[in-house]
Image (spheres, rainbow, N blue to C red):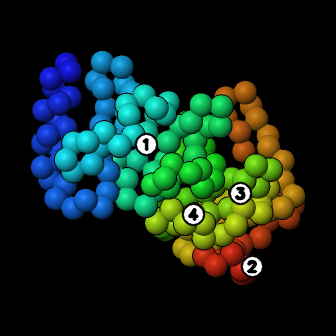
Amino acid sequence: MKKALVILTILISACNTNNDYLLRVEDTLTGKSGYINNKSDTIIPIGKYIYCFTDTFKNYAIVAKTNIGTVGIDREEKVLYKVFIFDNGPDYFSEGYFRIKNDKNKIGYADTTGKIAIVPQFACAFPFKAGKAKVSNDCSTVSDGEHSSWTSNAWFYIDKRGKRVK
């Protein structure tokens, strides 16, 4: 199995002729992952993070970090923000945005470059749809044991700049 990992690494890195991004590699025996450059040099060792979600690490990557959770990191491995968890993994992109959280569990949005587009400030926030996102600063979570949902009497919509819209 280790030989399969090395061969896969060589094949993947042959496709990466630019030196500007890293590729995710995985140890097929343990399921642990890390990142290599186009010369197959290990940049982030396999197993340093609980799991690496991002396949191609350009400006940022989403990883699961011990004692912190799922976070966005930059190329220097500085934690940029916590990533909102949806459906047992990092939030999905919707219209070029995904949800992030701050230390006070307020929700905001980052864009496809990994930059914060809307600073975390909402108690509840849905993904963007048709250019708007439904958000609230006053909501509660209702759970049936397996699933949970948000309720609020103060929902409003924002645009992709974070401005309130109708």
Check disc 2 and report its element: helix, strand or loop: strand
Considering depth in this image, is 96 or 63 the residue closer to the camera? 63
The residue type indicated by label 1 comes to Phe
The residue type indicated by label 2 comes to Arg
Inter-mark Cα distance, 1 to 3: 20 Å
Is residue 19 shown above or below 24?
below
Check disc 1 and report its element: helix, strand or loop: loop
**Which mark sits nearer the N-terminus, 1 or 3?**
1
| Circles 2, 1 touching at the beta carbon (< 8 Å) | no
Residue 110 bears which disc, if any?
4
Q: Where is residue 129 in the image (x, y as percent from the top left)?
A: 56, 68
Q: Where is residue 85 in the image (x, y as percent from the top left)?
A: 60, 43
Q: Position of residue 154 (x, y in %)?
A: 85, 64
In the image, taking residue 68 as reference, residue 63 lies left or right, namely left
Number of other residues with Cα within 10 Å of mark 4, as a class: few under 14, some 14 to 19, many 20 or more: many
Inter-mark Cα distance, 3 to 2: 15 Å
Inter-mark Cα distance, 3 to 4: 10 Å
**Which mark sits nearer the N-terminus, 1 or 4?**
1
Residue 164 bears which disc, if any?
2
Check disc 3 and report its element: helix, strand or loop: strand
Residue under numbered circle 3: 107
Identified at 70% across, 67% down, the residue is 119
